[in-house]
Every structure is written in structure tokens, then in C-alpha cells.
């Protein structure tokens, strides 16, 4: 029988991904993504990052992106739309980001939809898509 929601093992990769974004520490990405085909949908060009080369491109761009943000923090809401089939799971994760960019505080609410696969005994991200639901600036930063 499948669980009704992602368990701690299934949440490990999204949490590691979020911690990478907060810190810029690329070692936090070790073992997070599938060693196979990966697809990432993001809100910056080229918007679709495919395969291991696409993952490397996404990683380089994301390091630059988060390097320009200070005090970046995330908060996850309750996972939604959970489904599991064999060694594949899907769920949507409401996420709030706050931080400071260009001297201005921001508050971004969005959601990640994840597909993860079990590889080498761990859940790894096969794909994710990010969607912004709301975004607000406050000047100056608190």
C-alpha cells in the first residue's frame, strides 16, 4: 500500500534542493537528481533544462542567481496531489521564499511539482517545475 503523502525519505531531495538555493553550497546537490534523464522547468531562460547537460546548465545559472540574494529562506506548505507507482512518486509542494535582492526584500509564493525516482536506495528528482503564484517587493529591506 502506498503512503498518502511523501515520507521523510521522499522529502529529502526537495529539502536538499531548497538548502542549496539558500546557501549556494553545491555539495548539497550531491545525490539529489536522477543519474538518468532529468527535466527542469524554471522561470528563467531557457526555461526547459533537459538531460545531464541541461542539469549542469541549470546548476551554473542557479549558482549565479542565488549568489545575488541574501537572507534567502524557504518554507514548505503541506504537500499536495501525492501519487506513487512502483519506484516513481509525484507531489506538489507549496513553497514560500523570502530574501533580499538589490537591497529590496521580497516575498515569493509558488509551487514545485516533483517527479522522483528511486535510485540506489534513495529518492532522486527526475523532474520538477517551478511556478510563481505571487511575488511582492518591499523597499527598503527590513
Image: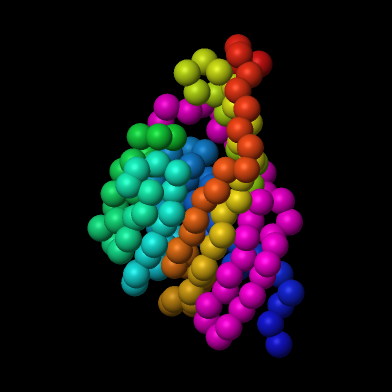
**In the image shown, does 36 or 12 lie closer to the viewer?**
36
The structure residue drawn at horizontal position 48% and vertical position 38%, both measured from the top left corner, is 23
Magenta segment includes 110: no
**In the image shown, does 47 or 55 lie closer to the viewer?**
47
Location of residue 116 in the rendering, given as x and y in whole percent from the top left corner: 51, 69
For this orientation, the residue located farthest to the left is 53
From the image, which quarter does the C terminus lie in? Answer: top right
First to last magenta residue range: 67-94
User: Can you see residue 3?
Assistant: yes
Magenta segment includes 82: yes
The structure residue drawn at horizontal position 52% and vertical position 81%, both measured from the top left corner, is 87
Location of residue 61 in the rendering, given as x and y in whole percent from the top left corner: 33, 41
In this picture, residue 60 sits left or right of residue 14: left
Q: Quadrant of residue 139?
A: top right
**In the image shown, does 127 or 136 lie closer to the viewer?**
136
In this picture, residue 3 sits left or right of residue 13: right
Q: Main secondary structure of the magenta part?
A: strand
Location of residue 96 in the rendering, given as x and y in whole percent from the top left corner: 65, 41
Residue 85's place in the image compared with 81, above or below, is below
Amino acid at each position: 500500500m502506498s503512503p498518502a503523502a511523501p515520507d521523510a525519505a521522499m522529502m529529502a531531495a526537495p529539502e536538499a534542493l531548497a538548502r542549496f538555493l539558500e546557501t549556494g553550497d553545491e555539495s548539497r546537490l550531491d545525490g539529489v537528481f536522477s543519474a538518468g534523464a532529468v527535466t527542469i522547468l524554471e522561470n528563467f531562460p531557457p526555461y526547459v533544462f533537459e538531460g545531464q547537460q541541461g542539469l549542469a546548465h541549470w546548476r551554473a545559472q542557479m549558482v549565479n542567481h542565488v549568489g545575488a540574494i541574501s537572507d534567502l529562506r524557504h518554507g514548505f506548505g503541506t504537500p499536495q496531489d501525492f501519487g506513487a507507482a512502483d519506484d516513481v512518486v509525484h507531489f506538489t509542494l507549496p513553497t514560500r521564499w523570502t530574501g533580499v535582492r538589490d537591497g529590496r526584500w521580497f516575498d515569493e509564493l509558488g509551487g514545485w511539482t516533483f517527479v522522483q525516482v528511486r535510485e540506489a536506495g534513495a529518492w532522486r528528482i527526475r523532474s520538477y517545475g517551478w511556478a510563481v503564484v505571487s511575488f511582492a517587493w518591499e523597499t527598503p529591506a527590513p
